[in-house]
Image (cartoon, rainbow, N blue to C red):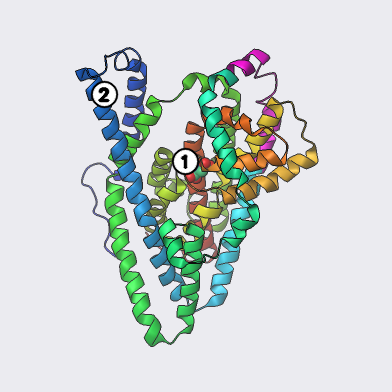
Amino acid sequence: MTAPAKSPRLALHWKILIGLALGIAVGLVVKHFHARLWAAAPEGSTLASVYSFAEQLTRLIGQLFTRSLQFIAVPIILFALIHAIGSLGDFKKLGRLGGKTVGLFFITAFIAVAIGLTLVNLIQPGGSRFISNEARTAIIEKIPGEIERANQLAGTAKSTNPWHLIRDIIPTNPFDALSRGDMLQVVFLAFMVGLALNVVPPIRSRPILELAESITEVFTTIVRWIIRCAPVGVFCLIAPIVATLGFDIILSLGAYCVTILLGLAMIQLLVYPSVVRLFSPIPVGRFFRGIAQVQMVAFSSSSSAATLPVTIANVRDKLGVPPDITSFVCALGVKINMDGTAMMQGVATVFLAQFYSIDLSLTQQATIVLTAVVAAIGSPGIPSGGMVMLVIVLSTYGIPAQGIAMILAVDRVLDMCRTIVNVTGDAAVAVAVAGSEKQLMKV
Ligand code: ASP
């Protein structure tokens, strides 16, 4: 495999960080002057046209960046996994890897939700200490647009049957699974093909394995090209978000935001470093440096699924996790390991119960841990993906789904932050599994 070309000047992750910082700065400037300048300019005037053109162009480049990552995700996972599992030659190892991976996913998810619930009970962000009756009315008045979105989510959630989450692991048509990009189904397909390749005679399996390896390398090269565009991509994703953020509503739900951010910080700075240190020799600093690019792409795209190709490239190239463990853990993780989302769903449920003065018994709170862990598994790794399943959690505890409207209004930034946690969790488990198997490579 060819090593990525080293830039003679600035390292790529610095360039991405600069793109991110510039995007935030430009977004803030645009937001500040928007009402006074562009919005006030008469329609059709040069100023209005230039603004509208620049806005459309920025959004377009941002979308091109995310779409190019999405475009690469399915083929890279399919072929990398087929090659990884197909050349295993040892089913016991596969069982062990699967057990460790899923075990760590669940343990970290339970710890994450437990942290969230402890914080939300201690801080009580939905109680009268933080939200007075007048503030309640004011908040609800500010969010009519969000109520419509909340109703749409409730509609989607009603048609989601939790049993189908398990049923749908097996696609009825593998080509349909590939074209829809359903990661769990793609993993299932690659798994089956990989297993069968271990059983058929080598004369039949060798050409397929060689082809899968070559295709993986081709797509890995494309991923590297896309990552090189990340500084611009990240700028174009973040600037329009910051330009349209409602800062006043964020402030009025400040205690809720602080609770979530505190919980995310604890998972990120305590739970994952412990996992990495416990199972691998990789120092925590090197772990975080190795996934800096991944975190910045996750933050600006709010999508762990779109970030997947970057996660795979960095976990393998910078942390030295072997390709088979990387593709297996990261592809599975993007679907079922979402600790940031699980924690948010737990905190949001208790927060809304406090807001609506609904008493949740200790037993009910304990069951929230389980419900949130399962709901996060069902949440897609896309922007606001955790919100649909939150509707289901709320309905389990008799909390009005419309309360979600309030949370939606502040969710943009929180979503960006929990997506960082979601991708970091996948990388931490990949490192831990490879470390426990003594398979970490020198990089
Ligand atoms: N945006 C999150 C992700 O992609 C999902 C969510 O919590 O909304 O990981």
Q: Which residue is mark 2?
A: 51
- Residue 218: where, in percent of width, then height? 28, 63
Q: Residue at x 27, y 45 (%)?
A: 229
Residues at marks 1 and 2 touching, judged by CB atoms closer than 8 Å: no
Q: CA distance from mark 1 to mark 2?
A: 26 Å
Q: Is residue 78 left or right of residue 341?
A: left
> Per the image, is 361 magenta?
no
Reply above or below: 412 against 140. Answer: below
Q: Which residue is mark 1?
A: 383
Rendering quarter of residue 260: top right
| Amino acid at the residue labelled 2 | Tyr
- Residue 2: where, in percent of width, then height? 26, 62
Placement of the N terminus among the 4 image quadrants? bottom left
Q: Is residue 273 left or right of residue 112?
A: left
Reply above or below: 334 against 439. Answer: above
Disc ID at residue 146: none
> Could you classify mark 2 by the number of other residues whose Cα lies within 10 Å: few (under 14), some (14-19), or many (20 or more)?
some
Report if the beta carbon of the residue with label 1 is closer than 8 angstroms to ligand 1.
yes
Rendering quarter of residue 336: bottom right
- Residues rendered magenta in the picture: 114-139
Reply above or below: 203 against 35. Answer: below
Tell me if residue 138 can be seen. yes
Q: Residue at x 47, y 57 (%)?
A: 182
- Residue 90: where, in percent of width, then height? 52, 78
Frontmost residue, 129 versus 185: 185
